[in-house]
Image (cartoon, grey):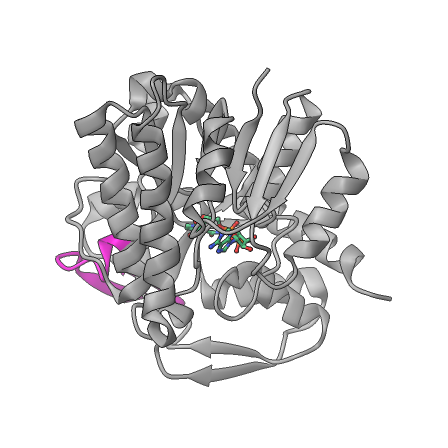
């Protein structure tokens, strides 16, 4: 049985997917340059739990030859390796481009040269929809809400026009479009998820990416949380186990779903504003974490909530872990993993 390749496999999503696959007896190759701070702990954990069927390649997606070799041996590819932070993309746009666009093109070119390319699942981002021009917002208590009742109830669907915002939005959006086009032009079986905020164990969140884990960690360490903007910005959040299930379904159905992009998140029922999250943390943690406020950051959407009905209708998938339960599980994991 050929292994499944997970690029960025040492990262948060990659580690959780790898654990699920390895537990079911599937062999897995992780391809990761270990550039993300904290992910070496994930590798340590994976090695301790799964030895035999796990191969770890410490390598870079910008290394076309090494990447090509890894892809040729795979029965499926999950492409997660990326420069993941909007902030880093603003300070280092060329690095962001090289990793997110060129790295993805290396993958696609290898797949194009194969007689029977394996299925590819790619994790794009809601940032491809930019500031959601045309979605009028109002203030409701501690959150922004769309004025349109349809969007308020259902979220943002794939018919929303693309508006790449920030170099990260441009690079992830380019990769998203290249993948859809390689499916269309060259018949590569590929599915794209445009994801909102994913959270759960093995997430080494920081101020630049992984805000839910970052906020919880700050509270646990009794350090101040900086809120950029007024804290009323809203996101939908999806617990990692639900995402892993969706990723596996996408892989299994890649030939049927190929060439499609799907919005992926917790949906309106799992939406939360930053201030609402702070209230929830205060309940879990027993005290309000210290807060600081700063200016809005470039590219920060005031509202983004996914409408996942296209994927739900196509596959029957639906999120099963509600936000308070998932956040409690992340909180407990972070608490356990803090050095005593
Ligand atoms: N976590 C989320 O909420 C979220 C939301 C939208 C999209 N995404 C996308 O999902 C993917 C995975 O996200 P994550 O949260 O697991 O991030 P992560 O930072 O935990 O994982 C990314 C991994 O890629 C590796 N990497 C970075 N550059 C590389 C390179 N050039 N070559 C090889 N490896 C490299 C890092 O070391 C890291 O282990 C990313 O593509 C990200 O853009 C994540």
Magenta highlight range: 128-145
User: Taking the image as drawn, is residue 232 in sight?
Assistant: no
User: Taking the image as drawn, is residue 88 in sight?
Assistant: yes
Q: Seen in the image, is 18 located left or right of residue 295?
A: right
Q: Is residue 127 above or below residue 105?
A: below
244 or 57: which is nearer to us? 57
Identify the residue at image location x=37%, y=83%: 295
Q: Seen in the image, is 296 located left or right of residue 220?
A: left
Identify the residue at image location x=51%, y=35%: 70
Residue 221 is situated, as x and y percent measured from the top left of the image, at: 72, 73
Identify the residue at image location x=39%, y=39%: 122
Q: Seen in the image, is 304 located left or right of residue 273?
A: left
Q: Is residue 25 above or below residue 269?
A: above
Q: Specify whether residue 22 is painted magenta.
A: no
Identify the residue at image location x=76%, y=33%: 50
30 or 193: which is nearer to us? 30
Residue 115 is situated, as x and y percent measured from the top left of the image, at: 33, 18
71 or 26: which is nearer to us? 71
Tell me which corner region of the image, top left, top right, bottom left or bottom right, holds residue 28. Answer: top right
Q: Seen in the image, is 8 located left or right of residue 135?
A: right
Q: Specify whether residue 131 is painted magenta.
A: yes
Q: Is residue 145 above or below residue 20?
A: below
Residue 125 is situated, as x and y percent measured from the top left of the image, at: 35, 50
The C terminus lies in quadrant: bottom right
Residue 25 is situated, as x and y percent measured from the top left of the image, at: 68, 20
The N terminus lies in quadrant: top right
């Amino acid at each position: 049985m050929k292994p499944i390749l997970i690029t960025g496999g040492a990262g948060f999503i990659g580690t959780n997917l790898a654990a699920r696959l390895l537990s079911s007896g599937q062999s897995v190759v992780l391809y990761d340059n270990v550039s993300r701070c904290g992910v070496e702990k994930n590798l340590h954990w994976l090695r301790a739990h799964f030895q035999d069927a796990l191969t770890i390649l410490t390598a870079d997606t910008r290394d076309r030859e090494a990447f090509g070799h890894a892809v040729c041996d795979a029965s499926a590819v999950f492409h997660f390796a990326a420069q993941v932070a909007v902030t880093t993309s603003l300070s280092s746009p060329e690095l962001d481009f090289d990793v997110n666009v060129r790295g993805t093109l290396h993958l696609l070119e290898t797949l194009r040269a194969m007689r029977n390319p394996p299925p590819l699942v790619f994790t794009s981002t809601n940032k491809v929809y930019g500031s959601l021009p045309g979605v009028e917002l109002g203030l409701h208590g501690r959150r922004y809400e769309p004025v349109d009742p349809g969007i308020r109830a259902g979220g943002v669907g794939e018919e929303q026009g693309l508006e790449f915002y920030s170099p990260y939005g441009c690079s992830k959006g380019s990769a998203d479009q290249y993948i859809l086009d390689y499916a269309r032009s060259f018949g590569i079986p590929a599915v794209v998820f445009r994801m909102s905020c994913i959270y759960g164990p093995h997430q080494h969140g920081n101020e630049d990416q992984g805000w839910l884990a970052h906020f919880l960690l700050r509270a646990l360490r009794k350090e101040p949380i900086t809120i950029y903007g007024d804290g009323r910005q809203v996101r939908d959040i999806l617990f990692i186990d639900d995402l892993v299930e969706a990723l596996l379904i996408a892989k299994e159905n890649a030939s049927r779903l190929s060439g499609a992009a799907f919005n992926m998140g917790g949906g309106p029922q799992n939406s939360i504003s930053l201030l609402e999250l702070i209230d929830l943390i205060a309940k879990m943690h027993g005290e309000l974490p210290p807060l600081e406020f700063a200016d809005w950051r470039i590219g920060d959407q005031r509202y983004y909530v996914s409408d996942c009905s296209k994927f739900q209708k196509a596959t029957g998938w639906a999120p099963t872990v509600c936000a308070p339960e998932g956040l409690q599980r992340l909180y407990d994991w972070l608490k356990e993993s803090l050095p005593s």
